Image: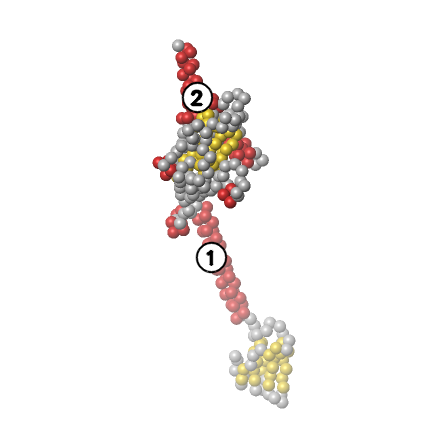
Amino acid sequence: MQGHWVVLAFCWLGQLSQNLRPQIANPKLATNNPTLTTIALEKPFCVFDDSLSPGSSYVVYLYAMADSASTVSSAVTDNSSKPLNTTFQDTNGGQLGPYRAALFNVPNCASPPMLADVVNVKKVSDVLKQYLFRVGDDVTCLYDPNFPGACNPPLAEDTTYRFKYLLVDVVAGVVKDQTLWSDPMKTSKVKQSSTIDTWPGRRSGGMIVITSILSTLMFLLVVGFLASIFVFREGHDNRPRKLVTCPSYTLITLLLLEPWPYCSLHLSVCSTISHGVVLAYSLNGVLL
C-alpha cells in the first residue's frame, strides 16, 4: 500500500508542470507591464525540476501566439514530439499559430535570484535578467538575415497573447515536458488625446497648492509694481519749482539741480540752463 502511494506521488510530481501556466511578471519588479509592444513573464523557476534527468542537457523554449490563433492551431510539437521551428514571420506575428520567441537555460531552482537585491543599483539588472523574460524586446532581429537563434520582435499593440514554456532535451531534440498555455495577456493601447481627462479635479493636491502659491505671488508682484509707479509720480509732482523772470518772459524749471539763469536784454529772452538744457517757457509772466 505504501508503494502505491509513492507511485502516485511521483506521478503527481511528473504532472505538476503540465498544470502550471506562464505568469506575468510581478508588477513591483516589472513596472509598466505590459507595454505597447512587450509583455514581461516570470521564468519557470522550479517548474521542470522533476522532469530533469542527471547527465542530460536541457533548454527552455518559449512559444507565443495571438489569442485569436488558438482556434486555428495551438500545437507546438510535431508527431515525433519535436518542437516546431515556426518563426514570427511564418505565423504573421502569431496570428496564424504559435511561434518560438525565445530559448534559454533552465532556471536554477536551487539558487533563485534574491528579489531583495532589486534595491541594489549594482545588482538590479542581473536580478531582473534572471527572474523575467520580456517578450517582444528585440527590435532588430526581423531585419537581420543572419540573426542567430529565435527572433523576439515587438508584439502588436492592443492585442491579446498567450504563452507556453517547453522543456527540450538538447541531445534528443524532443520535448520532455511543457506547461499549459498562459491566461490571455493584452498589450497596451495608445491613448487618444481626446480621451485624456484634463479636469483639475484629476490633478494632485500638491499641484493645486503650488499653483495657488504662484498665483498669489504674481498678484503681489503686480500690486507692488503699480504702487511703486504711483509713489514715483506723486513724488515727481511735489518737487520744488524755481521761478526765473525777465522783462518779457517767465521760465519755470523742474530740475532738482540749481540752475544758472541767463538773460539776454537785447532779445528780451530769459533762459534757465542747467547743464545746457532748456526746460520750459511761458509768455508774459504766466506760469506754465
Which residue is pictured at 51% across the width and 32% down the height?
Answer: 104
Image height check: is 10 above or below 276? above
Choose the circle earlier in sequence order: 1 or 2: 2
Residue type at numbered disc 1: Phe
Which residue is pictured at 50% across the width and 65% down the height?
Answer: 230
Which residue is label 1 attached to? 219
Residue 46 is situated, as x and y percent measured from the top left of the image, at 48, 25
Numbered marks: total: 2
Q: In front here: 251 or 201? A: 201
Q: In front here: 288 or 119? A: 119
Which residue is label 2 attached to? 14
Give the spatial CA distance, label 1 vs label 2: 75 Å
Which residue is pictured at 38% across the width and 51% down the height?
Answer: 194
Which residue is pictured at 42% across the width and 30% down the height?
Answer: 78
Residue type at numbered disc 2: Gly
Q: Secondary structure at mark 2?
A: helix
**Does residue 122 appear left or right of residue 13 in this picture?**
right
Residue 182 is situated, as x and y percent measured from the top left of the image, at 41, 32
Q: Which mark is residue 186?
A: none
Task: Inspect this view and state whether residue 40 appears.
Answer: no
Coloring basis for residues: secondary structure
**In the orientation shown, which residue stands out farthest toward the left?**
71
Q: Secondary structure at mark 1?
A: helix
**In the orientation shown, which residue stands out farthest toward the top?**
1
- Check disc 2: other Cα within 10 Å, few if <14, some if 14-19, many if 20+: some
